Image (cartoon, rainbow, N blue to C red):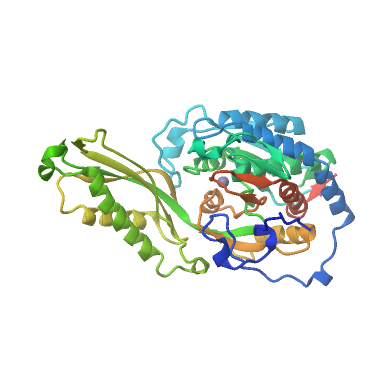
């Protein structure tokens, strides 16, 4: 059985949705029916061998994860972590290749998110394992992202540095320990153990460490454009004892408000761009409320599935000058089935209406995430096969969950590759004190090992 951390958490099985939201890593307790426990076969001898071989890699996995966390891989700094992944893949005995980010290819692709930063000299890493003897296996992508979000505000981390990688009482701490270097470590641990047993998949398994999951999804897209496709993909995001079958889409946008600047003493002849931006924020909150009014299933299980985030604001430079410009950066979510052009049109209409009575322009600008939502059927072969592997490892079925965050599973889905997220148990992703429960990293690797045996087939 999967141990439960002392403070409870997502491993506790099904929990009422009200206890777990609004974390994007919450699971909603939607379950699927499995054969009663007493009729479930125990692991076959071959499976026990796999489970034990992966358990024997626990120290290797923990050490790798600590080293990954100690590499600061915030946007633009991903290479420090990619070097660690590349070395680990070579240690396993695989031959990783670089898939460089290519701005021109990405900008020409309809599913890429727009970006205004430099992506030159950024690489994704892909190592292909197999195929071995025999045919008939299904190919697979095991995917994790190396990039992490900023640990700001640094002053809140206290004694422990954000990139400590400290190991204490069964937890590994630091930015990225949860989201999602733990998943990368689990994937690499699985492959190391199976490879070490002399097993080879009957169809290719592509192991991917990608950049830019936290801002565009373009890293994973670039690997697919390079030809590394498969019959299914598992993104090892830390959802705990749960498999994601639905996720929202995410759109990033900025609103640039132009005011009429001037001396603060002549306020009646000026237009304050910062104060005008507050009107726009309020109007966008109304749009958010509209989107939350009647969510489609399974998002009706959340009381507030669509979240608008005011992520950054900048305007003005002097207490005695009326600010002439203010730029506010937003993130908003969208349900599967909703189209980006429709959401953009609604946002632009709201901004236009909220600023129609003012002098100066209001512009909506796009950059970063432009990803529609994604879902996969609960009984899709990928979901069933992974859930059954989970049952054989843990003895209980995983929850099938919807998430109010986005992930690279959506990139695969939109490119026609069935995909889910499944990974370790973690806490405070993107927050202060981010950490992952180490035994769950090993257990994730064990579930993945049993899943690969079933999905791909393994040859001696
Ligand atoms: Zn993530």
The image quarter containing residue 242 is bottom right
Screen quadrant of the N terminus = bottom right
Above-or-below relation of 207 to 120: below
- The residue lying at 46 percent from left, 36 percent from top is 105
At x 36%, y 56%, the residue is 343
Apparent side of residue 275 relative to residue 205 in the rendered image (left or right): left
Image x and y of residue 390, in percent? 74, 58
Q: Is 429 on the left or on the right of 397, as rendered? A: left
Q: Quadrant of the C terminus?
A: top right
Q: Position of residue 40 (x, y in %)?
A: 82, 67
Along the line of sight, the residue nearer the viewer: 6 or 409 = 6
Based on the displayed image, in which of its 4 quarters is residue 18 positioned? bottom right
Is residue 382 visible from the viewing direction of this image? no
Q: Say which of 277 and 265 sits in front.
A: 265
Q: Is residue 310 in view?
A: yes
Q: Is residue 167 left or right of residue 42?
A: left
Relative horizontal placement of residue 290, taking residue 442 as reference (left or right): left
Furthest-right residue in this view: 45
- The quadrant holding residue 402 is bottom right
Q: Check the image and name the residue furthest to the top.
A: 121
**Of residues 198 and 67, which is closer to you in this image?**
67
Q: Position of residue 335 (x, y in %)?
A: 45, 61
Residue at the (71%, 59%) spot, across then down: 385
Instruction: Report how many numbered discs are placed on residues in the image.
Output: 0
Q: Position of residue 87 (x, y in %)?
A: 69, 29
């Amino acid at each position: 059985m999967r141990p439960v951390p002392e403070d409870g958490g997502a491993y506790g099985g099904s929990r009422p949705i009200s206890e777990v939201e609004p974390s994007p890593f919450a699971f909603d307790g939607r379950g699927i029916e499995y054969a009663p426990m007493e009729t479930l076969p125990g692991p076959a001898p071959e499976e026990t061998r796999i489970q034990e071989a992966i358990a024997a890699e626990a120290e290797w996995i923990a050490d790798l994860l600590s080293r990954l966390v100690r590499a600061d891989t915030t946007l633009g700094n991903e290479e420090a972590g990619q070097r660690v992944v590349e070395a680990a893949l070579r240690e396993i005995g695989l031959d990783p290749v670089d898939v460089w980010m290519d701005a021109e290819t990405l900008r020409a692709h309809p599913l890429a998110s727009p970006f205004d930063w430099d992506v030159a000299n950024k690489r994704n890493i892909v190592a292909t394992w197999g195929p071995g003897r025999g045919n008939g296996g299904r190919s697979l992508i095991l995917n994790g992202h190396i990039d992490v979000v900023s640990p700001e505000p640094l002053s809140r981390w206290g004694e422990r540095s954000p990139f400590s990688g400290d190991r204490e009482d069964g937890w590994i701490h630091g930015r990225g320990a949860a989201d999602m270097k733990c998943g990368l470590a689990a994937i690499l641990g699985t492959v190391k153990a199976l490879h070490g047993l002399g097993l080879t998949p009957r169809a290719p398994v592509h192991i991917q460490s990608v950049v830019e999951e936290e801002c565009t999804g373009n890293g994973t897209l670039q690997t697919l454009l390079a030809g590394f496709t498969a019959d299914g993909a598992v993104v090892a995001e830390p959802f705990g004892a749960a498999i994601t079958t639905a996720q929202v889409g995410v759109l990033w946008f900025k609103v640039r408000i132009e005011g009429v600047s001037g001396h603060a003493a002549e306020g009646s002849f000026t237009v304050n761009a910062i104060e005008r931006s507050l009107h726009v924020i309020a109007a966008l909150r109304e749009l958010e409320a509209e989107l939350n009014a009647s969510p489609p299933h399974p998002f009706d299980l959340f009381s507030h599935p669509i979240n608008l985030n005011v992520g950054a604001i900048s305007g003005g430079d002097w207490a005695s000058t009326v600010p002439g410009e203010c730029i506010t950066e937003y993130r908003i979510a969208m349900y599967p089935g909703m189209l980006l052009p429709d959401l953009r049109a609604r946002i632009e209409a709201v901004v236009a209406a909220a600023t129609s009575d003012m002098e100066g322009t209001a512009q909506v600008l796009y950059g970063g995430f432009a990803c529609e939502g994604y879902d996969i059927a609960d009984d899709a072969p990928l979901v069933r096969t992974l859930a059954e592997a989970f049952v054989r490892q843990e003895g209980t079925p995983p929850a099938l969950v919807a998430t109010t965050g986005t992930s690279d599973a959506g990139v695969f889905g939109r490119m026609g590759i069935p995909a889910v997220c499944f990974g370790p148990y973690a806490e405070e992703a993107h927050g202060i004190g981010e950490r992952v429960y180490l035994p769950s990293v090993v257990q994730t690797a064990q579930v993945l090992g049993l899943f690969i045996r079933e999905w791909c087939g393994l040859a001696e």
